[in-house]
Image: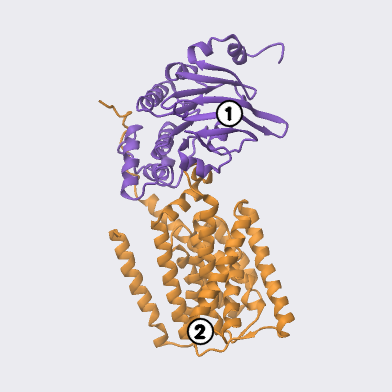
Chain colours: A orange, B purple
Amino acid sequence: MRLSRDEVWTGIIGAVAVAAAATLPLFDQGYYLAIALNMVLYAALCTAWTLFSGPTHYVSLATAAFFGLGTYAVGLGLDYMPFPALVLIGGAVAAILAGLVGAATLRISGVYFVIFTFGLAELVRQIVSYLQVKLSASMGLYVFTDFTEKHIYWMLLALTVVVFVTGWLINRSRLGFAMQIIGNDETVARHSGIDTARLKIVLFMISGGFIGMAGAILAPRYSYVEPPAAFNPMISFLVVIMALLGGTRRLWGPLVGVIPFTIVMDIVSVRFPNDTSIVIGIAFLVIVYLLPDGITGRLEQLWAHSRKARPEPEPVPVEERA
Amino acid sequence: MTAAALRVQGARKAFGGLVAVNDMSFEVREGELFGLIGPNGSGKTTMLNLISGALKPDAGEIALSGTLISGMPAHKIARAGVARTFQLVRMLPSMDAERNVMAGAVFGHRRLWGEQAREAAHQLLALVGLRGREHVPVAAMTYIDQKRVELARALASDPRVLLLDEWLAGLNPSELNIGIELIARLSEQGRTIIMVEHVMDAIRSLCGRCVVMNSGRKIKEGEVEEVLSDPEVVEAYLGDDDDA
């Protein structure tokens, strides 16, 4: 596999950044670790979300469903299986749900997909709530582990790295090229020989699987897991907002949105605990109106404007053949 | 006897009560440049859509080199070896010319990857007259250059049959000559081409045989000169006052 110079540098910078981030729990185990944990959580979620929604432009609001299934896999299985196995199972269950949703909905157009995924997340939450009460006569599940915040932080950081590497590999592959073509013009994609429905389902499964794994890893943070928390629709909305704020055209775009927004959300939820949804709503409007391509998209535009367009060579007439 | 490059037999497509294509049958031979002509709304584009799999026929069969392709999804037909251009040029606007053409090379009939796909794209861009402009974003290109890119993309899959849907439409007279010359060159190279076209001069100078459609039906098939002088064809084009 050949790497370009840019890729080598990105890899080095990325490795240094991850190494630096990994040392954080050595300095602080309180407030800053808590905020950093939220950042890596949303970095993993938003990047995984963007794997699918970036190239296809399908806005999925099913994040909470995948996330909650991962959380619940841990809650249900902790007495019977080792934690790493449960993370994989959580991811697999989420991926299977994503596959079913994809098979049912990805042939329909974008708007219906948004509504369907939102409805689905709510449906899953209701079903799990119902079963929870019906089968166990309690409102939730206890999750007792030896993990502290720093362990969860490291695991989420590792997951984020895995998501990034996966995204990078996809971008280099036929699948990634196919997704770019689909994002440009699905008709051209089909007539070029791309099985658009199948590829979208595959990518949605990969994306959903990672979101499920993130949910599984986060489960030990709450010692008690309830459907309203595990399947909180706010997770779906926050992921969309942060990813759009950063920009979904590049793999690292969402990260640029996650870092400031996590800090802002923390301040808002402390100062105005009852009005967070208003702030989120306003933030969403502002981002969509002022930064439709996100921060990274805007920066790229500015960069393109600042350089003078290179003169194009004259078109060459039809090649003369001897 | 070898199978025809493309054989259409009894193809039919209706949209509600409107029968757009009605009992169409024709054969295109290997290496032939075949014209599909007729007045506006006669069902030519629908016929192309049936061949390329954009639409499924209600009845009838379409076979590519003897293999039945009617009823297959579009991407399978593309992989089997049918490539097309569109009446209104369709670009991948966020990409440059090279990547647009690579789309055909990577996913079509040939399924190349990496350096091979890039090389194929460069060769075809040179063939259609865009050498040196591989990295120009297609969104910044003129209409005819976009059409060239689209043609190169279709060719990149090395199709058994190439469908051109009014590829010459919208070109100015000098561009038209370049376009006709280009299609003639492809034909000389042995490509099997079906072209839907309104530009009669192009049909006359390029096609050997053609089929004429009117109201979804085939009204004439044969050598171009003979077909175009047929009274029924002339009437179809000039219109029938009594019936109007």
User: Is B163 left or right of A222, judged from the image as shown?
Assistant: left
Q: Residues within 10 Å of mark 2 (few under 14, many from 20)?
A: few
Q: Position of residue A218 (x, y in %)?
A: 53, 79
Residue at (61, 24) in percent of width and height:
B42
Q: Is residue A214 visible?
A: no
Structural crowding at the residue carrying mark 1, measured as other residues with C-alpha within 10 Å and reported as few (<14), some (14–19) or many (≥20): some
Identify which residue is drawn at 51% across, 83% down. A83
What residue sits 47% from the left and 23% below the top? B34
Q: Nearer the viewer, residue A202 or A284?
A: A202
**Left or right of A171: which side holds B230?**
right
For residue B178, above or below residue B141: above
Q: Secondary structure at mark 1?
A: strand
Q: Position of residue B113 (x, y in %)?
A: 36, 49
Chain ID for label 2? A
Q: Amino acid at mark 2?
A: Pro
Which residue lies under the disc numbered 2? A82
Disc 1 chain ID: B
Q: Position of residue B139 (x, y in %)?
A: 44, 41
Instruction: Identify the residue position indicated by label 1 in the image.
Output: B9
- Residue A210 is labelled as none
